[in-house]
Image (cartoon, grey):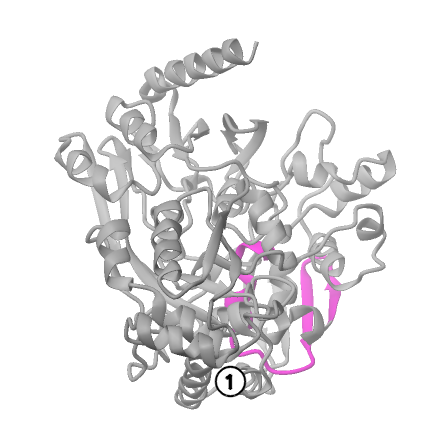
Amino acid sequence: MKKTRKLLIAAGLLASAAASQAAGTLIYCSESSPSGFDPAQYLSGADFDASAETVFNRLVEFERGSTKVIPGLAESWTISPDNKVYTFKLRRGVKFHSNESFTPARDFNADDVLFTFQRMLDKNHPFRKAYPTEFPYFTDMGLDGNISKVEKLDPQTVRFTLKNVDAAFIQNLAMSFASIQSAEYAGQLLKSGKPSDLNQKPIGTGPFVFKRYQKDAQIRYAGNKQYWKPADVKLDNLVFAIVTDPSVRAQKLKKGECQVTVYPRPADLPSIKADPKINVISKPGFNLGYVAYNVKKPQLAKLEVRQALDMAINKDAILSAVYQGAGQKADNALPPTQWSYNKAIKSSAYDPAKAKALLAKAGYPSGFEMTLWAMPVQRPYNPNAKLMAEMMQADYAKIGVKAKIVTYEWGEYMKRAMKGEHDAILIGWTGDNGDPDNWMNNLYGCDSVSGSNYSKWCYKPFDDLVQKAKVTTNVAERSKLYAKAQEILKSQVPITPIAHSTINQPVRKNVESFKVSPFGLNAFYGVGVK
């Protein structure tokens, strides 16, 4: 039965591919199933691509292919002189989607903004009590503690009041987690006892309407004919074909069975580039692949142990074997293209003998055992986590550390990692808003210990600098604070930066106006097929 179902799905995708020119259908070969369709619940680009970039809008948004913030569901906004009060004028005439059980009775208004943010702010919110969930990005950024109130001034005006200045607040609201939900739809789900459908049958205002999802197979969307920005809807149908094997994705792209694919293996790039029907867009990656050490674990709580593991890794060998020319060695905990990057920080030298001496000093002359988690999927910052883990396992063995490689399905991997079940973990990040806070606070700050701070590292001297930078509006002063924070982070070794990968985005030449996101997302509004 399973084999028959897979054949039917494959046949369906082939049929869609053959009809793509006539029907305005674009097929995107994605790498993994989303964990769900409520962007506020997740941290992964695969989840955001399947929801925030298709079904939803935000009050403000990033211009496609850029870090520039432009109006979204808010036509305009004003900021008070003390930088703590933000007032948004909302766009009129915006329609929410419909599905088999919901037809909106009104247009988007302030009630939807209030529902979206009060659900994240208030743990006793009726919807949150009926459908218990966490909002890791919102809390990682400290927004749950810094947003004092969200008010409806009239149906088309909302006001956010902050307790403290947040220099990146507008950029934060353009991020995927801030996607606006329908309060009316949520109310109907609550009344019918099906609140979890918010995450399985999404309703938004975005350029594509969610139709159906088959786990590990495909997601189907239809172009939103009522979209408030009609020029952005050039496709009748959008299909996410979920293909975990990168070599299979490359073959499907060459055969025209998908028009856009994601994360080609470095080894596949020459043949893809040689295909006359495919363009490969290459850009420096705004990303970092790294290994995080869980400081809550007894051995890894010791600085000398983390220093030893750090200098035991042969980064040059990993760059050669894993990235194959499509990456650069990472010295620091954020990419060189991020303003405030501290150029003075350099990687520790590869030195197994010194690493072994540090372990002995820490009380482990014979080494110890630990787990090393490896991602089951390709990410922009790591083309082959399995191979990287195997190479690190061999490096650690040279200093007496026995690393057991562990992996899980991607959604499970992320969920368990946020809980801190790992010892050391291969993970990474692609910047989401162009601000240093998105790296320094989200990945290494005390606010995010229960979320994307996979080291579970909360160090007050570092955190004080990061929090001070967050409330400082002068860019030069912020840069000085972040530069000092980077020095502290380097000295305490909660992570080992491995590499920044080059982004290679293959697109068939019949695709029009596709733009590579600096944030590693894949958006298809404004995209057409010839």
- In this rendered view, identify the residue nearer to me: 37 or 158: 37
- Based on the displayed image, in which of its 4 quarters is residue 238 positioned? top left
Q: Is residue 151 magenta?
A: yes
Q: Residue at x 52, y 59 (%)?
A: 369
Position of the N terminus, as image quadrant, is top right
Position of residue 456 in the picture relative to residue 269 (left or right)? right
Position of residue 456 in the picture relative to residue 68 (left or right)? right
- Based on the displayed image, in which of its 4 quarters is residue 396 positioned? bottom left
In the rendered structure, which segment of residues is drawn in magenta? 149-178
Q: Residue at x 87, y 38 (%)?
A: 191
Task: List the residue tagged with mark 1.
Answer: 469
Residue type, numbered disc 1:
Ala
- Based on the displayed image, in which of its 4 quarters is residue 298 positioned? bottom right
Vertical order, 221 against 394 (above or below)? above
Residue 73 in view here: no
Count of numbered circles on the image:
1
Label 1: which secondary element: helix
Q: Residue at x 41, y 73 (%)?
A: 308
Count neighbours of disc 1 (C-alpha within 10 A) and say few if under 14, some if 14 to 19, many if 20 or more: many
Residue 471 in the image: state x and y as whole percent.
Answer: 56, 84
Residue 197 in view here: yes
Residue 206 in the image: state x and y as whole percent.
Answer: 54, 42
Q: Is residue 89 magenta?
A: no
Vertical order, 89 against 52 (above or below)? below
Position of residue 456 in the picture relative to residue 16 (left or right)? right
Residue 478 in the image: state x and y as whole percent.
Answer: 45, 86
- In this rendered view, identify the residue nearer to me: 280 or 404: 404
Position of the C terminus, as image quadrant, is top left
Vertical order, 391 against 472 (above or below)? above
Residue 509 in the image: state x and y as whole percent.
Answer: 22, 33
